[in-house]
Amino acid sequence: MSKPNSTSWTQSRLGALYEVREDEAFASTFDAVFSPSCEVRVDHTPSTVDAFKESISSRRAAGAGITLSWENVIATSDSPDESSVVAGTLIVTRNMKFRIRAGPAQRQTHINFSARVEQDPSIQADEHDDHRRITSFYHTSVDKTPPIHFAMPHAVTHGKEE
């Protein structure tokens, strides 16, 4: 099986960080995505890889279910063997453990990101002999509560009066 292109690799790896449920699996998934020496900026403020890891991990606990959607994802190169910058928007919708009316409460995180994906021969390759890691990551996010959609009331008719 061939290596995925830069866009697919970035989407699958970042998506897995938000979808994984167990703490141990999260830690190994994170380490398979980010270089230990990754330059991280959160809201354009320098951060450490460990602080960023903790931030993502702490957000995972509140959700009972999750859906991801991607918008405007672009890459400077889609070759799996070349360095590339992949940027776009990831919308993470979390179903909370409590309900509002008949449906689960939801929380959306809109993440604008820019990731430099490079080959790193010093790390262990994955099952596709792929040595890619994110070496620079810019992350800007906003949390939003999606609107609650109530059932539309209908007029009650009692039959015809004569």
Image (cartoon, rainbow, N blue to C red):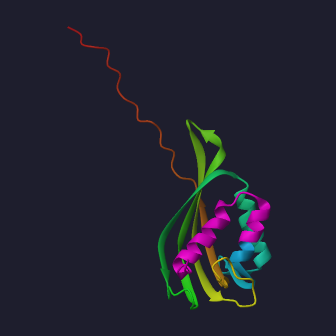
Compared with 132, 102 (above or below) is above
Residue furthest front in the image? 1
Residue under the point 51% across and 87% down: 79
Horizontal and vertical percent position of residue 22: 75, 58
Q: 103 or 5: nearer the eye?
A: 5
Res 50 quadrant in image: bottom right
Q: Is residue 112 magenta?
A: no
Q: 14 or 129: nearer the eye?
A: 129
Q: 24 or 38: nearer the eye?
A: 24
Horizontal and vertical percent position of residue 89: 53, 71
Q: In which quadrant is the N terminus drawn?
A: bottom right
Residue furthest left in the image? 162
Res 36 quadrant in image: bottom right
**Left or right of 150 in this view: 13:** right
Q: In which quadrant is the C terminus drawn?
A: top left
Residue under the point 78% across and 61% down: 23
Horizontal and vertical percent position of residue 101: 56, 36
Compared with 144, 103 (above or below) is above
Q: 48 or 124: nearer the eye?
A: 124
Give the prevailing secondary structure in the magenta stretch.
helix
Compared with 51, 92 (above or below) is above
Residue under the point 73% across and 55% down: 61
**Left or right of 26 in this view: 44:** left
The stretch of residues the image draws in magenta is 1-29
